[in-house]
Image: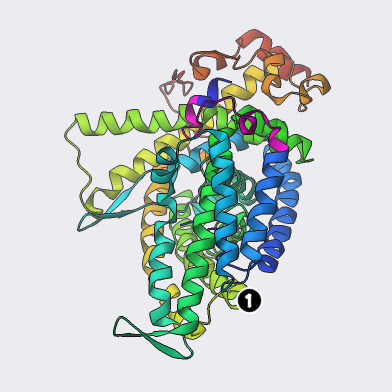
Amino acid sequence: MGADHGHTLHWHGHSPLHRAPAHLKVVGLVVFVLAVVATPNHWYAAFAGWLALLLGVIAVSGVPLRYLLPRMVAEVPFVVFAVLLPFIAQGERVEVLGLSVSASGLVAAFGLLAKGTIGVLASLTLAATTETTALLIGLQRLRVPAQLIQIMSFMVRYLDVVTSELGRMRVARESRGFRARDPRQWPVLARTLGALFIRTYERGERVHLAMLSRGYDGTIPEAALAAPARAHGSHGHAHHGAPQPGTSTQPHPGRAAREVAAR
Amino acid sequence: MHVPNGFLDAPTSVATGVVATAAVGVALVKARKELDDRTAPMAGLIAAFIFAVQMLNFPVGAGTSGHLMGGALAAVLVGPWTAVLSTSVVFIVQALLFADGGITALGTNIVLMGLSTVLVGYLVFLGMRAVLPKRASFVPLAAALGALVSVPVASLVFVVLYAIGGNADIDLAALATAMVGVHVLIGIGEAVITYLAVASIVSVRPDLVHGARPLLEQRRLVIHDTAPATSSQETSA
């Protein structure tokens, strides 16, 4: 699927984990993380066990840890919160390195860090070993409503188009000498958002017209439902390997108009 | 800022998951009224837009910057149900493909940043639109007030969830004070940016702003001497 280059977390590979059906991986992830989250904070050995299990799975997947570790930055704000916990939590105080901290806060901080870290690493493992298309098919197997899957597939498909539109706007601003330093530059940045919304909305309308002109009647055909990868291919829209999804969305004016008139 | 796995206990995570599932289910039905058969492509592109909105950093000064949460903005631009649907899809994709926000906290994140900011922002917006003069030029102000209120209310919802399923015994009054205090400041930033962004759209294409449409219908047809330029600009990607 052409949208996969927007999915930067994927690590190409052919391990058993890469080949495993996506719905099993999603269910596995949810069950694993729920089990980790439900583990009491003071069961330190259990967390070591969960981490060992996860590291074993990562070893099987062949995704290097040095690829996964830098991508764990999403966790940082909560690490800060966890570090502060022993100081702000209530209850019995204990002395650690000459500092008076809350005993329960210390245990809670450990739990937060352990659960957060194992959770992020597990999510990264799913993202690194699962293609976008496979994931959407997996969600379909899990009875996620078809309409929601369609919306997700459109979002993933156009993510790169919309974000690179934002990138081109940044290049245009900065090539005219614009530098965002403080709130005085907010009006320019906010107008960028306004322009991006108008362009995105109009692109959505063009995509819809292009679909109508190819016979879209509000539902994706049964045959295509079985494989979301080709769901929109049956409308001839945004084909596999189409270099620029945006350029293929211009509707044929005559056919689109007839289609609309016929409705 | 997404809630990670393990921040709230398992029963609370499951409960917010059920609430989020119900909300997305209702939004799927109601969004069809806002978009009819355009739902799939439009909601998908608006989700991509919200994702991009959260990528654009606004400098606050001293080297720090923040980004819009965009719940109230999306509600005013595309209508509340499409906004709930699109923001929820953003969180699902972020959790599954970008490992951003815990997968067991997905329901919590949807309830906090999708459902509560969108609905609170939209309700305040509706209230303000009813009170303010009935002109499209007041829509950005109403949207800004919606954004201003939505962010601290979402932080209060977080405190309530933490009180039910939090994993540490923090003084809840202190947590509520700190969270609301910080989020009032964030809300002011959100309000200013929402005002500026909605104003820029209302001045160019007021017909695209869902929250401005009831006001536009009251406009009377004005015939100019010279025909205005056609509005169909075929911008290619």
* Residue for point 45% across, 82% down: A89
Residue at the far left in the pictured view: A177
Judging depth in this view, the residue of A163 and B202 nearest the camera is A163
* Residue for point 66% across, 29% down: A134
- Pointer 1: what residue? B164
Rendered location of residue B171, percent (x, y): 49, 85
Residue at the far bottom in the pictured view: A92
Q: Amino acid at mark 1?
A: Ile
Seen in the image, is B146 located left or right of residue B40? Answer: left
Q: Helix, strand or loop at disc 1?
A: helix
Q: Within 10 Å of the Cα at label 1, are there few (<14), some (14-19), or many (20+) other Cα atoms?
A: few
Which residues make up the magenta segment? Answer: A5-23
* Residue for point 33% across, 47% down: B57
Residue B72 visible within the image: yes
Rendered location of residue A252, percent (x, y): 61, 9
Rendered location of residue B9, percent (x, y): 63, 68
Judging depth in this view, the residue of A135 and A171 nearest the camera is A135
Residue A130 falls in image quadrant? top right
Residue B65 falls in image quadrant? bottom left
Colour convention: rainbow
Q: Chain of mark 1?
A: B
Residue B210 visible within the image: no
- Residue A39 lies, with reference to residue A180, above or below; the image says below
The reply to whether the magenta stretch includes residue A204 is: no
Image quadrant containing the C terminus of chain B = top left
The reply to whether the magenta stretch includes residue A21 is: yes
Residue A34 falls in image quadrant? bottom right
Judging depth in this view, the residue of A123 and A148 nearest the camera is A123
Residue at the far right in the pictured view: A222
